Image (cartoon, rainbow, N blue to C red):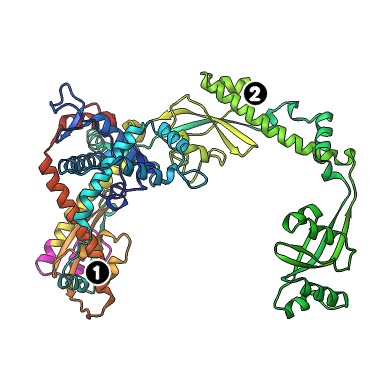
Amino acid sequence: MINFFRSFFQSKLGLALTIGFLVLIALAFASADVSTTGTFGGLSGTNNVAVVGDEEVTTADLRQSTDNALRQVQANEPTLSMEQFIEDGGLTQVLDTLLDRVAVSEFGRLVGLRAGENLINSEIMQLPAFRGADGNFSQDLYQQALRSQGLTDQIVREDLSDGLIARQVLIPAVFGAKFPDSIVRRYAAQLRESRDGSVAILPSELFVPENEPSDEQLETFYRENRSDFIRPERRRIRYATFGADALDERTQPTDAEIRQRYEQNAELYRASEERTFTQVIVPTRQAAESFRERIQGGASIDAVASEAGLEASEIGPIVKEDYAQSANAAVANAVFGADEGDVAEIARSPLGFHVVRIDDVTAIPARSLQEARPEIAEALRNEKQRRALNELASEIEQRVSSGESFREVAEALDLEVETTRPLTASGAVFGEQGETAPELVQPLVATAFQMEEGQPQIAEVETGETFVLFEAASITRSAAPPLSEIREDAIARWKLAEGAKAAKAAAERILKRVDEGSTLAAAVRAEETRLPPPQPLSITREELMQQQRPNPPLALFFAMTEGTAKRLAVPNDGGFFIVSLDEITQGDIENDDPLIAEARSGYGEVLSREYGDQLRVAIRSDVKVERNDDAVASLRREMTGATN
């Protein structure tokens, strides 16, 4: 999770405003607004968490960047809470990233680097988030984005300036880094290395104690492992839908409106005809006349066109007005002046001379007002309904903006109110396996988890058809529940933890036997507890690298010395692996092996990152970074809800 977070900028701008630029150093820095006044004076009398050179990093900066980082990680892990994020090292990572960003920016200015106004303008105009429908920069979208993020143009420009300076500092240091070919060849050969051994697992479930914990043992265990019992934030969403059924007779068209629409569109209801015909367009009148004569004599229009290397096309059914738009009035007059089965007089359009055979003529009789009335009434009713719904939505939005509560608005409009069961940020019903929010509510969940309690909003569910008024009816913050509520779960976890301790002791006994010369299989069989037999392992490093997420025992397998055995804990007190490496077979590689080129590219990226890391460490030392650990600890307690 933290690795995912590290790959993005954490800043007041947020991901949407930063990901479009500085991609080359996205692993390196946060882009946050930092004030530039004052000096470090300890915890008392200051909101600083650090001072980098002459620049301050305030608690507000760190809190804002941490909030943004959490939101970005929640895009992949929606149920992740702030407490879990900080427990996993999120706050520390955000602070480190902020300090790197400020340090590099400060260093860049000290050595005379700058980002001019025109360059900053260019970066803003290139960000996709600010482009309108025509693909060009939109000032309105820019201002709208700033307002939605609570930003100012100055903050954006300062962030961009800092990021551009950072790019000027870092890219020259890391660009084009590569290992010598001799080292690349050595590493490439390692990818062909194969290893043989075995792995045993000692599940904690096989070692759990039969006895129940005492109250004191359980309370101590719960207090020491409280973070493992944190429940995700839950919210009940109260909602009410409204559509056509919420409207009165205002949507019914009057006789006068129907007559006016009929008169406005009289051409749609007069007598007309549709024609279907086949045409071929030729470049000269002489050729067109020749084609017409042969077709009138009984030749196939398709065959005549094919002989000349042309292709005839069928058009229609189509009315004269529409055909005139695709050709021109002269061609349309000729086509619609010929009888069915005839070949129309030759006429010319910008495309050439049209040879047209009339295949079918369908007369469309005129429709009276009475005959057209149902169609016109339906169209007017739909138009008035959409307009009335939009007006009703605007009215509700105004009521909400003026301070009316959800229930007041719902009662005034006689809307049926429903409330969901407690939902997590993923849209799942809390505590109910496989159950989710109603289909109508699912699109609202993400917004509802950004809302404060009792602040209703309106959303359009079906364009022009259905709207929904909704609010966060109740919010249960992420926290560990009282022990009394989860006593049985806590007992099960205590037993598993005790089982893990016993599994660890068994793993140590097994390792001791292996060190004394026993095979892993024999050492496992010597245990009183019946354990699963070890499984053989045989894999090359190249096969390991092809796995997106190599399992931990395999990763350990390739970090060991031949003839050794090591233990590895299974997460969440699941037990222990014991990995035994029996033999390493060195890999061979030819001079023309394509793996060498791949290794050269891959290890070049690794070297670039290392150069960047070393440069940031040197810059931090040069500009001098002073942390206020007390302020950081205070903010940590505040953001996790800890009391001390």
Can residue 322 be seen at all in this image of the molecule? yes
- Res. 414 mark: 2
Q: Position of residue 293 (x, y in %)?
A: 85, 75
Under mark 1, the amino acid is: Ala
Q: How many marks?
A: 2
Which residue is located at x 9 percent, y 67 percent? 516
Rendered-image quadrant of the C terminus:
top left
Q: Is residue 533 magenta?
A: yes
Looking at the rendered image, the disc whose residue lies closer to the viewer, 2 or 1, is 1
Local secondary structure at mark 1: helix
- Going by the image, does 429 lie left or right of 249? left
636 up-or-down from 326: above or below: above
Q: Which badge, 2 or 1, is on the more N-terminal residue?
A: 2
Q: Is residue 248 left or right of residue 133?
A: right
Estimate how packed mark 2 is, as few (under 14), some (14 to 19) or many (20 or more) residues with alpha carbons within 10 Å.
Answer: few
- Give the amino acid at mark 2: Asp
Q: Is residue 312 or residue 284 the one in the foreground? A: 284
Residue 134 x %, y %? 52, 46
Specify start and end residues of the magenta stretch as a single range.
512-536
Relative horizontal placement of residue 447, taking residue 91 as reference (left or right): right
Q: Are marks 2 and 1 in contact (CB under 8 Å)?
A: no
Q: Any magenta on residue 19? A: no
Alpha carbon distance from label 2 to label 1: 69 Å
Nearest the viewer among 213 and 71 is 71
Q: Residue at x 36, y 41 (%)?
A: 121
The residue singled out by tag 1 in the image is 599
